[in-house]
Image (spheres, rainbow, N blue to C red):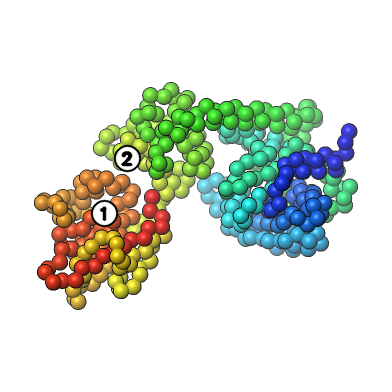
Amino acid sequence: MTNINERLFVTLAKQLGEYKKILVGFSGGLDSSVLLHLLVNWRNQHNQEIQLRAMHIHHGLNLKADQWVQHCQQICDDWQVEFHFSRVTIDARQKGIEAAARDARYQVFKRELQKDEILVTAQHLDDQAETLLLALKRGSGPAGLASMPSIAAFADTLLLRPLLDYSRNELEMYASKHRLNWIEDDSNQDDRYDRNFLRLHIMPLLNQRWPHFPQSVARSASLCGEQEQLLDELLDESLKELITQDGALGIPSLAVCSEAKRNAVLRRWFGYHEMKMPSREQLNRLWCEVALARADAEPRLQFGNYDVRRYKQKLWLIPQWQSLREAIIEWDICNTLVLPDRLGELNIADHGIQVRGPASNERVTIRFGVQGMISIVGRQHSRHSKKLWQELGVAPWLRERIPLLYYNEQLIAALGVFVTKESEAEEGREMLTISWHKTLLK
């Protein structure tokens, strides 16, 4: 049998292909130490054409975390690898420590990746088996059971896992042969964590009974992945027809689908928005409580930091924005005003909404979320704000995101939407053109 050194190197070469810029996740543990050593050898064989960087994540969860940074820095110095580390704050309230730490890591990777750079991480065969068992525990479908692909799209580039077909024992053989030093994380012995429980108590029994269990699990994960890929291809045209240009999903076309097809399309809609896959229960609630809610309702259902909303017979994924209802912002109209919550900025320009200039005794402010009766230019009668927004086609979640121009306590304009009759100037009064440069409004 070809030795582990040659097999690992052949696998790495096959995956890397012509990629020249590589960011590797480097914890300092066995797996990532083997991976980094392989990548250094790969770089050295290519006459330094390869640009290799290592990224270490300081989770702050272990008293030895600072020492681990120093260890990783020293290894990278010895191997002449550009080293970076990032401290993250873990919020385990919603997902638990393991999932929160993983999310934090990948957020850093996403932020730090450079143009044309790929991400390479060190998950191995035993990790794959544990991931599938955890997915079974959660009651996951084929997408979850597909576990980790060896190559995946990530942050407008690729994520490669070249060690995924190799067991921890094989990596230990490689590390021993090359006399590598690595970190042993003592928290890996804490079986309160689900993955550690599997690793310490369940996997040894399964491997003892069925020595090739991890390989069989990996094969099942691969088959589930193939089924998901086939579904992606079969549903691609349906999804394109159902998703509007602004990313919403048409309800009437979904309503004529079978429940199985509808759920499959909804899952891919979440994937289109790079959202975590919803459970079957969540999909049932989405359909019953949002899509099929009574006609005069404004239903919403929370998914992480987003809400699914219904508007004009479409489903929308909307960020949970900061409430601006109480905001009152003074504006010196001679200067540009930067709006809160990344809404953009206002200034006097050559294009935009035209209103009368304020009198010397009128205080100019920007507010959000108007209520009450409003008389706008072009309408003979006043209308209640809710009815007016509806008539103008402004979605409910945007109504508190539109800057409202006030002179003293008088509403003058909803910028980009309407001007009130109070905005009209007396003869000879100066007119202003206000431009709203939007940066985040969806």
* Residue 248: percent from left, percent from top: 39, 40
Q: Specify the quadrant of the image occupied by residue 323.
A: bottom left
Name the amino acid type tagged 1.
Answer: Val
Q: Nearer the viewer, residue 334 or 374?
A: 334
Q: Which residue is mark 1?
A: 417
Q: Residue at x 41, y 60 (%)?
A: 342
Point 72% across, 39% down: residue: 164
Closer to the camera in the image, 227 or 42:
42
Q: Residues within 10 Å of mark 2 (few under 14, many from 20)?
A: many
Residue 203, position as x, y percentages in the image: 74, 35
What residue type is disc 2 on?
Tyr
Query: Which residue is under mark 2?
Result: 311
- Work out which quarter of the rendered image holds the N terminus and state it: top right
User: What residue do we see at 33% from left, 55% from top?
Assistant: 401
User: Would residue 108 be seen by someone viewing this image from the given angle?
Assistant: no
- In the picture, measured across the screen, residue 135 lies left or right of residue 248, that is right
Q: Please, is residue 147 above or below residue 107 in the view?
A: above
Where does the image place residue 64, in percent across and percent down from the top left? 72, 60
Is residue 257 at all visible to an observer of this figure? yes
